[in-house]
Amino acid sequence: MGIANPCCAHRGASGLAPENTMAAMKKALTFPFVEWIELDVQLSKDGVPVVMHDDTVNRTTDRKGRVADFTAAELASMDAGSWFSPEFRGEPVPTLEQVLDLTAGKCRLNIELKTYGGRYPGIEAAVAGLLRRHGRTRDSVITSFDPLALRRVKEAERSIRTGLIIDAAPPGLEQALARIGAAFLSIGWTRLTAERMAAFRKAGLEVMAWTVDRKPGMRRIAAMGEDIIICTNYPDRFGELKAGRKFKWFGR
């Protein structure tokens, strides 16, 4: 019997294509059951929200340096694909706006702000403004490890849902989320238990479990309830469980 949970492709289908690139986003969209894509956003030197996990380009491009020291055009000229496979040579660092255009009407977005302690002043308003202009405030959630960043999102645009990212389950977590107006919880999957999920449901939280890459873990999360979003680097593995067999994906 297959699983019925919503699936989120982590950094796009990052187990199958270079993370946080348009190739990874397009690969994720070939799976008809992918309801969400998670991606990471930072600010370029010229204040453009760009899609990158690390605060430097060292690991995933052919250049070295901090994301904040390059313009969006300079980031777009980098090779962000060869580190993963020669097949993806020349894949650029995308902007958030490009991902918004690609995914419009196709899936929801979990946009993680990679900011801590005010590292990127203005990132919250910049991302909120993009979502507003593209009509994506209703089918997106902005998440962060930084509660202050979530407060600033709400100050910029109250209609955007926000969510805390955490790899823990401290007492009073539900109350802390209520204080910052966050109705979404992105939690390390090993922290979830049936008892905690019951408390999260009672508090009216939507829960995403990250990052679940092995089938036994996916089954464990699914057993706690079909309402839990399973975030994975490998949507193909999720698809095999969903179908209850070896899954072959087709383009949309």
Image: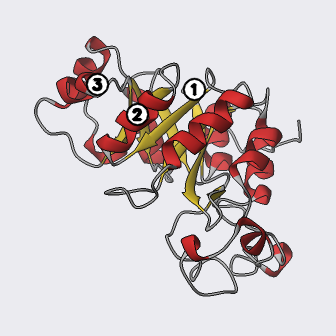
In the rendered structure, find residue 105 and report the number of the disc placed on it. none
The spot of residue 246 in percent (x, y) is 71, 45
In which quadrant of the rendered view does residue 38 lie?
top right
Quadrant including the N terminus: top right
Label 2 – label 1 distance at C-alpha: 31 Å
Q: Residue furthest left?
A: 171
Residue 173 or 1: which is nearer the viewer? 173
Q: Amino acid at mark 3?
A: Met
Residue 207 or 95: which is nearer the viewer? 95
Quadrant including the C terminus: top right
Q: Secondary structure at mark 2?
A: strand
- The residue beneath circle 3 is 197
Say which residue appears at 78% left-offset and 69% top-offset: 73
| N-terminal label among 3 and 2 | 2
**Left or right: 135 in relation to 251:** left
Residue 76 in view, yes or no: yes
Say which residue appears at 72% left-offset and 24% top-offset: 135
The spot of residue 87 in percent (x, y) is 85, 75
Check disc 2: other Cα within 10 Å, few if <14, some if 14-19, many if 20+.
many
Label 3 – label 1 distance at C-alpha: 22 Å
Residue 27 or 52: which is nearer the viewer? 52
In the rendered structure, find residue 163 and report the number of the disc placed on it. 2
Say which residue appears at 45% left-offset and 37% top-offset: 219
Check disc 3: other Cα within 10 Å, few if <14, some if 14-19, many if 20+.
some
Residue 244 in view, yes or no: no
- The residue beneath circle 1 is 1
The spot of residue 221 in percent (x, y) is 40, 35
